[in-house]
Image (cartoon, rainbow, N blue to C red):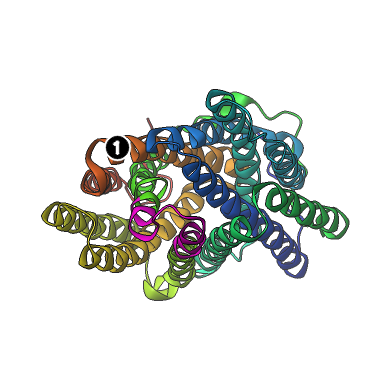
Amino acid sequence: MTPRPDTRAAPPSGLAAYAAVTAAYWAFMLTDGALRMLVLLHFHTLGFSPVQLAYLFVLYEVAGMATNLAAGWIAARFGLTSTLYAGLGLQVAALVALAQLDPGWQVTTSVVFVMGVQGLSGVAKDLAKMASKSAVKLLAPKEGDGLFRWVALLTGSKNAVKGLGFLLGAGLLATAGFTWATLAMAAVLAVILAAVLLAMPAGLPRGRKGAKFSEVFSKSANINWLSAARVFLFGARDVWFVVGIPIYFYAVLSDGSEASNRAAFFLIGTFMAVWIIFYGAIQASAPRLLKAADRSESDLIAAARTWAAVLALVPAVLAAAAMVAGAPALWLTVVLVVGLLVFGGLFAVNSSLHSYLILAFAKDERVTMDVGFYYMANAGGRLVGTVLSGLTYQLGGVPACLGTAAAMVALSALAAGRLSSGTGKEALS
C-alpha cells in the first residue's frame, strides 16, 4: 500500500505552517501580478501587436501545464516545503534575467528572450501554487466547512495581493522604468525567501521516495470533469483579461504621448488591480455567501453548475453591447467596467467552488498528484485564453473577445454538470 503523508502537525503547528505558506504565496503573487503588467504595457508601448503580446505569455502558460503535471510528483517525492522554496527561487531568477533585456535587440530576439523568461516564471508560479494549495488539504480542520474556509481564504487573499501587484507593476513602470522595477522586485522576493527558509515551522509532509510519476494521472471521473470545467472557466477569463481589455483601455485613454502613456498606465493598472482585488475578496467570502457550513457536498456540486450558467450571461451581454457600439465610446467603456466587475464577482464564486471541490475530491495520500493534475488543466485554460485573447482582439475586437468568453463559460457549465456526489461511489474512468 502507498504510505500516507506524514502530516504530524498538531493544530497550532498546522496553523503556523498554513500562515507561513500563505505569506510566502502572497509575496510570490505580488511579483507575479506586477511582472505581467510590466511586460504587457512595456511591450505595447514598443509597438507590439495584440498577437505578439499574447505570444509573450504563451510559454508562461505552456510551462505551467508541464510544471503542474510534474509538480504533483515533485512534491510527493521531495516534500511541499522544498517545492515552495523552488518556486520562490525560480521567480527571483526570472526577475533578474528579465532585467537584462536590451532595448537595442531586434523584435524577434526580444520576443524569444521574454518568452523564455516568462516560461521560467510560469514554472515558478505553479510550483509555488501547487505546494500552497496542497498544504491546505493537509492542514485545514476536517470538521464543518473548515476546508472550504481555509482554501477560500488562501485563494481569495492571494488574488487580492496579485491585484495589488498589477497596480505595483504599472506604478513601477511609470516611475522607475522597466529594468529597475524588475530588479527591485527580485531583491524584495529574495529577502522574503530567506525569511521563509529560516522561519518555516513543522507541519508539512517531507515526501516519499516511492512516489511514481504515473500516479499523477487521475482515475477519478469527478476530478477529470472538474479539470475540464476549469479549462473552460479560466480560458473564458483570460480571453479578454490578458490582452483584449487592457489594449482597448489603452486605445481609449492614451494619445501616444509620454504624459498620456503614464496616465493610461496608472488607470489600466488601477482597473486590473481593482478587478483582481474585488475578485479575491468575493472568493474569500464564498463560503459565507454560499452558506457552505449548512450545505452538503452534493449541494455545492449543484451550485457549481448553476453559478457557471449564470456567469455565461455576463460576457454575452457585454459582447452584444460592444457590437452595438461599433467603436470605442464613453458609454461602452462604462458598461464594460461595470459588467466586468459583475463578471469578476460571479467568476470568483465559480473559482472558489472549484478550488474547494478539487480538495474535497482528492485523497490525502495523493493530494499533490490530484491538485497538480487539476492545475495543469487550469494552466491549459489560461494558455487557450491567452492565445485567443490576442487573436480574437486582432480579428474582431472586444466583441469577439467577450463572445468567445461566453461560449467558454457555457462549456464549463456543461462539464460541471457531469460531476457526481457520494463518497466512494464516484464513477471511475
Question: Magenta segment, which residues?
Answer: 248-268
Q: Which amino acid, by three-letter code, is at mark 1?
A: Gln
Residue at image position (32%, 48%) is 420
Image height check: is 171 above or below 127? below
Please state which of residues 420 and 104 is positioned toward the viewer in this rendering: 104
How far across and down, in percent of the image, does residue 226 sit? 38, 44
- What is the quadrant of the N terminus in the image? top right
Q: Quadrant of residue 343?
A: bottom left
Whether residue 272 appears in this view of the structure is no
Residue 323 visible in the shown view: yes
Q: Secondary structure at mark 1?
A: helix
Is residue 252 covered in magenta?
yes
Query: Which of the pair 141/268 is nearer the observer?
Result: 268
- Furthest residue to the front? 257
Magenta run includes residue 329: no
In the rendered view, does 117 fall on the left or right side of 190? left
Q: Around disc 1, counting alpha carbons within 10 Å, would you say few (fewer than 14), some (14 to 19), or many (20 or more)?
A: some
- For this view, does 124 lie left or right of residue 197? left
Q: Position of residue 7 (x, y in %)?
A: 73, 53
Which residue is most to the right?
Answer: 198
Prevalent SS, magenta region: helix
Please name the residue shown 64% across and 32% down the image: 73
Asked whether 397 or 27 is in front, the reply is: 397
Quadrant containing the C terminus in the rendered view: top left
Q: Position of residue 171 (x, y in %)?
A: 59, 62
Number of disc labels:
1
For residue 142, above or below residue 1: below
Nearest the viewer among 425 and 110 is 110
Q: Which residue position is annotated with label 1? A: 394
